[in-house]
Structure formats: structure tokens, C-alpha cells
């Protein structure tokens, strides 16, 4: 066995492809039904890979192919990628490589390989991986909702500050402005409610052992609670403003 040298390039993405070798045998039964069984416990895969090499690297590759890989008779350990990621994989070179000049100093090299098996997730690992993806999706949704809540809070603060400026100048008869304030406040409450629902869902999943990012959840819930408190205070303030508008009290500087 030999190793793919670290100075050799990675396979080109646009030409990198692989296919699973048929791993089942079919037997037709007397009843007419077909029975299938797996041939190998491993997962052999055929690959087609291409590389771009400089003339210097190609010279090293030619020597390596003849002397180390022994024209494909030796197994080769090289980094290859599948859905799990990049991992050192045992392969056999199925047929002699082909090379063509791409420019004066660049060579395009193509090989067909057969991997004895790719790194695959076990059944338990697949379940854990799905839970991890669900964890990441939930965190992303929570962060997005939290950001929307923060944006709504910022908008409402700006509007409230402007409202205070208007009050200082005796402009409290601007009913449209008050309506805008109430609308912005309602958006804040809606975002806060959405965040609460997401956080509760996150907490349920954590309780069932689907993930345990306790610190993030704790910080998120604290931040959400603070924003809900602020939102409730702003609700009371906006209702007071509305009552004063109704009672014609805003002209009293």
C-alpha cells in the first residue's frame, strides 16, 4: 500500500463524481417472487477524478505512479470526499491514467478509481446527525426571531423618542403618529410572542435530550424575558397616550 503525496493537488470539483457498485444479488423464487441479498458488507464505490498539475508536480506524479503505486497494482490511501466529509480512503487505480497538456506548464490528469468503502454514518450516528441538523435549524430560527424582535424594539424606541420631541412642542394632536406608535408596539409584541413559542419548542427538545445547548437557551430566554418586560411597559405607555389623546389632554403643555 502507498499514500497519495501531500504535494499532489485535490481533485477538480467539476469532474469529481462517483457511483456505488451494485451490491445486491437477485434470486427468483419458485413462487415468482424475487429475493435480494447484499453481496458485500462494505460499500465499494467507483470514482472518476481529474487533477491539474504543474509540470514539476506531474513529473513527481509519473515517478510515484511507476515506483510507489506500481502502475495501479498497489492500494493507495488518498483524501476523498463524500457526504460525510473528506477522509483518507483506500482506493485502487482501475486503469492507467490519461494526461493532456492544458498549457505550456499545466497538465490535466484523469484517473478511474475504486474505493473499497467510503466513510458512512451508522444508524445511530444518522439519528444523532439529524438531531444535530434540527438543533442548528432551531437555533437559526431563534436567532432570526430574536433579531426581528430587537429590530422592532429599536424602531419603537426611535418612534417613542420622536413622540417625546413632539410632546415637547405641543404636537400631541397628531393621531396618525399615535397610530404608528401603536402599530410598531403591536409588531414588537407579535415578535416577542413568536420568540416565546420558539424558545418553548427549543426547551421541549432539550428536555427530551435532542440537544443540550443550555447556555444559549438560558441567555436567549433571559434576553427574551427582558424584551417582553420592555414591550409590556411600552404597551402601558402607549395605552396611556391613547387615553390622553381621546380625552383631549395632549394640548396641555
Image (spheres, rainbow, N blue to C red):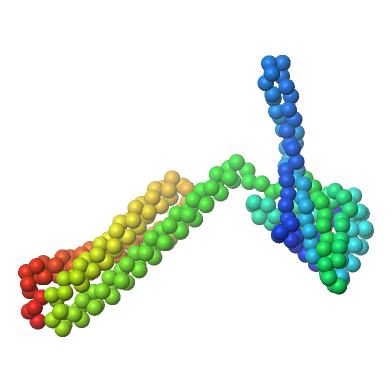
The residue located at (7%, 79%) in the rendering is 252
Return the residue nearer the eye: 237 or 223. Answer: 237
The residue located at (67%, 21%) in the rendering is 33
* Residue 240 shows in the view: no
Quarter placement of the C terminus: bottom left
The residue located at (22%, 63%) in the rendering is 232
Count all numbered tags in the image, as a single digit.
0
Return the residue nearer the eye: 79 or 180. Answer: 180
Q: Residue furthest top?
A: 30
**Which of the 4 image quadrants contains residue 124?**
top right
Return the residue nearer the eye: 128 or 143. Answer: 143
The residue located at (63%, 43%) in the rendering is 122
In the rendered image, the vertical position of residue 224 relative to residue 161, given as above or below: above
Horizontal side of residue 98 vs 206, given as left or right: right
User: At which x and y percent is residue 158?
Assistant: 28, 75
Horizontal side of residue 80 vs 156, given as left or right: right
User: At which x and y percent is residue 102?
Assistant: 83, 67
User: At which x and y percent is residue 152?
Assistant: 32, 67
In the rendered image, the vertical position of residue 226 relative to residue 158, given as above or below: above
* Residue 161 shows in the view: yes
Q: Residue furthest bottom?
A: 169
Return the residue nearer the eye: 49 or 71. Answer: 49
Amino acid at each position: 500500500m502507498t499514500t497519495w503525496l501531500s504535494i499532489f493537488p485535490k481533485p477538480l470539483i467539476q469532474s469529481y463524481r462517483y457511483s456505488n457498485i451494485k451490491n445486491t444479488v437477485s434470486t427468483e423464487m419458485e413462487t415468482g417472487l424475487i429475493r435480494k441479498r447484499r453481496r458485500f458488507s462494505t460499500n465499494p464505490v467507483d470514482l472518476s477524478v481529474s487533477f491539474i498539475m504543474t509540470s514539476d508536480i506531474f513529473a513527481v506524479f509519473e515517478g510515484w505512479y511507476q515506483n510507489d503505486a506500481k502502475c495501479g497494482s498497489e492500494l493507495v490511501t488518498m483524501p476523498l470526499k463524500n457526504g460525510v466529509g473528506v477522509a483518507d480512503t483506500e482506493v485502487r487505480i482501475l486503469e492507467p491514467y490519461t494526461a493532456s497538456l492544458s498549457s505550456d506548464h499545466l497538465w490535466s490528469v484523469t484517473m478511474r478509481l475504486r474505493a473499497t468503502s467510503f466513510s458512512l454514518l451508522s444508524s445511530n450516528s444518522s439519528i444523532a446527525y439529524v438531531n444535530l441538523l434540527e438543533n442548528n435549524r432551531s437555533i437559526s430560527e431563534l436567532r432570526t426571531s430574536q433579531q426581528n424582535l430587537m429590530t422592532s424594539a429599536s424602531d419603537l424606541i426611535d418612534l417613542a423618542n420622536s413622540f417625546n420631541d413632539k410632546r415637547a412642542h405641543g404636537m400631541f394632536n397628531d393621531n396618525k403618529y399615535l397610530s404608528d406608535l401603536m402599530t410598531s408596539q403591536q409588531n414588537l409584541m407579535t415578535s416577542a410572542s413568536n420568540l416565546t413559542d420558539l424558545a418553548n419548542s427549543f426547551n421541549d427538545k432539550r428536555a427530551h435530550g435532542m440537544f443540550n445547548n443550555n447556555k444559549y437557551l438560558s441567555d436567549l430566554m433571559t434576553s427574551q424575558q427582558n424584551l417582553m418586560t420592555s414591550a409590556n411597559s411600552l404597551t402601558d405607555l402607549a395605552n396611556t397616550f391613547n387615553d390622553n389623546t381621546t380625552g383631549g389632554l395632549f394640548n396641555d403643555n
